[in-house]
Amino acid sequence: MLRIHFSAEDLARTRVAAACHPLWEIAASLHRLQTPAGRWAYAHWYRTARERLRAAGLEGAVRQVLLPLFPRAPYWPDFLTPLAGVDGLEAGLAEILATPADRVAAEIALLTRAGRTPARLGRLPEKEARAELVGILRAYHRTVIEPHEEWMRECVHAERIRLARHLLDGGAERLLEGLGPAIRWRHPRLEAGTYPTEHDIRLEGRGLLLIPSYFCWKGPVSLADPALPPVLVYSLHPHESPGGPGPHAAEAAGSPSLAALLGRARAAILRATAAGATTTEAARRAGVTPATASHHTTALRDAGLITSHRHANTVVHTLTPLGATMLSRNLRDAAPGIG
């Protein structure tokens, strides 16, 4: 059980990361390689990731270095996912290099006590060994994360729109209530019952940074050391289920005209969801009745182009990565002089 304890000041200082954190994504993607859990949702990524790692000559480094450092277990070292990563991969890698040697040694010792680790990882307090690790992390990211960054950005964009609606409609507490079924808001605590350890984080005025994660599956993750800047990494796909489109559904073919493909009203509703829209707002944009708009949103949702979230009597629709790809390609193909 994870319990994060809030004060009124902490609620005021809760915020949402503007983009995926590349080092948390590396960690979560390595966990996807270690378990079949949720693999149906990442089937396309899993298949291409293995092929790309093999082609890049990274299979040995992943097996011998990264998987032991990022075990799918209750603990892996906190220094591998520094807060600086919110500013991008290179900022995060620089922070790993700058981590004090005594902290690295202490965290590797914790990892070793939690399970068997290769002897070579004991050299990580040395800066030269960490520089080698940084090179492996950079190559891994370039090989299997970077090709999916456009989809990841669209996911985070849609999530921030969804959470902004919650915040505007019900304040910070409504925002915290909407983080998915694995996370519960029970004033003044945020709880995750599936967490692998008993862990309490007392924010004490520091606030909480919420980090939506593309590769995180099901339960949320936080740092082991409660003295570090508090973060909660949670899944961008809490509502996906087998048989649905999943986060890596096949890409939609480009189309010069959404209206020709979907029909005028349905295409207008899809465009409206790019900024988040209720059924009534989408109906107004498309010039149809709310009942007709509801029929169209159901069809778009069934096709995997939008996702819908209900709160009280309001349903907010936002684009899925597949819908965002279709819309962005349509806009690109329609723009003069492009392509």
Image (tube, rainbow, N blue to C red):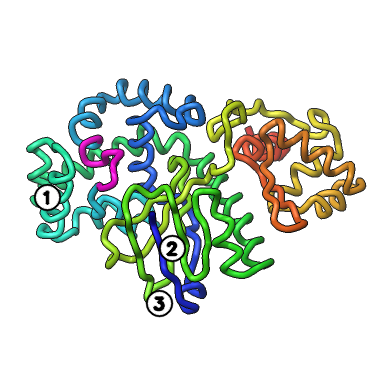
- Which element carries disc 1, helix, strand or loop? helix
Give me the disc on residue 205: 3
Quadrant containing the C terminus in the rendered view? top right
Calculate the distance from the C-alpha at mark 2 to the C-alpha at mark 1.
28 Å
Quarter of the N terminus within the rendering: bottom left
Residue visible at 86% across and 46% down in the picture: 286
- The amino acid type found where label 1 is placed reads Ala
Frontmost of labels 2 and 3 is: 3
Q: What amino acid type should be assigned to the residue bearing mark 3?
A: Gly
Give the structural element (helix, strand or loop) at label 3. loop
Residue in view at x 57 percent, y 45 percent: 154
* Prevailing secondary structure class for the magenta stretch in the rendered image: loop
What label sits on residue 109 in the rendered view?
A: 1
Query: Badge 2 local density, few (<14 within 10 Å), some, or many (20+)?
Result: some
Between residues 308 and 318, which one lies in front from this camera angle?
308
195 relative to 83, above or below: above
- The answer to whether 241 appears left or right of 103 in the picture is right
Query: Does residue 27 appear in this view?
Result: yes
Instruction: Please tell me how many numbered marks the rendered image carries.
Output: 3
**Displayed quadrant of residue 281:** bottom right
Question: Earlier along the polypeptide chain: callout 3 or callout 1?
Answer: 1
Residue at the image position 43 percent from the left and 66 percent from the top: 208
Asked whether the beta carbons under mark 2 and mark 1 sit within 8 Å of each other, the answer is no
Position of residue 59 measured from the top left corner of the image (x, y, whole percent): 25, 25
Residue 336 in the image: x percent, y percent? 71, 39
| Amino acid bearing label 2 | Leu
- Residue stretch rendered in magenta on the structure: 67-75
